[in-house]
Amino acid sequence: MIITPLAIADVLLFAPKVWRDDRGFFFESFRQDTFAQATGHTAPLVQDNHSRSQQGVLRGLHYQLPPHAQGKLVRVVEGEIFDVAVDLRQGCATYGQWVGQHLSPDNALQLWIPPGFAHGFVTLSPHAQVLYKTTTYYAPQAECCIRWDDPTLAIEWPSGIVPQVSNKDEAGLAWEAAPKF
């Protein structure tokens, strides 16, 4: 497994070794020991989530406040997404910055988004299935959402996609009004 820090060093890209042949492929999608060594997160990941979205569906930017803040290990098993993490940690050099990464089964990449970040993605293919593990359970009372198109964040979503956003995400908070860490 090759683990690479992105422009925000705490957001990590996991690239597993994939064995491919004419029959298909095999790879270890998760190893607790490798994950703990790379992230420093030694507690077990407690919840698996699975979503399916059509092309153009944009989900996010979601996060949970302490003590329910979630880290997420995200991968795609069908289709392609552009996945985004936004640093909400006041006092960090990368506060208010974002990073994005294309994820698909072809590249087999996984994105680690630690607690203290908002998360969102847009589906680029006709549909996509996204799996992610979380560090804490979903807690609706702690959930927050920042608007995906907030001008302060100025996220460069891929061009040519007309975003389809839920009512909840459309009502997301502006960056200035959103609770931070």
Image (tube, grey):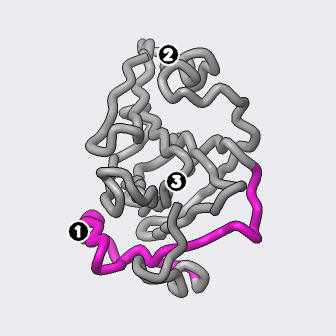
Front of the two marks 2 and 3: 3
Q: Residue shown at 56%/18% (left/top)?
A: 28
Give the CA separation, mark 3 to mark 1. 27 Å
Tag 2 and tag 3, C-beta contact below 8 Å: no
Q: Residue shown at 26%/63% (left/top)?
A: 158
Say if residue 83 shows up in the picture. yes
Front of the two marks 3 and 1: 3
Front of the two marks 1 and 2: 1
Say if residue 76 shows up in the picture. no
Residue 4, by quadrant, is top left
Q: Magenta includes 141?
A: yes
Looking at marks 1 and 2 on the same chain, the residue that comes earlier in the sequence is marked by 2
SS for tag 1?
loop
- Residue 144: image location, x then y, percent: 60, 71
Give the CA separation, mark 2 to mark 3. 41 Å
- Quarter placement of the N terminus: top left
> Which span is picked out in magenta?
137-166
Q: Which mark is residue 23?
A: 2
Characterize the magenta stretch by its predominant secondary structure: loop
Q: Magenta includes 54?
A: no
The relative height of residue 32 versus residue 156 in the rendered view (above or below) is above
Check disc 1 and report the residue beneath it: 159
- Residue 156: image location, x then y, percent: 25, 65
Check disc 3 and report the residue beneath it: 116
Q: Nearer the viewer, residue 117 or 30?
A: 117
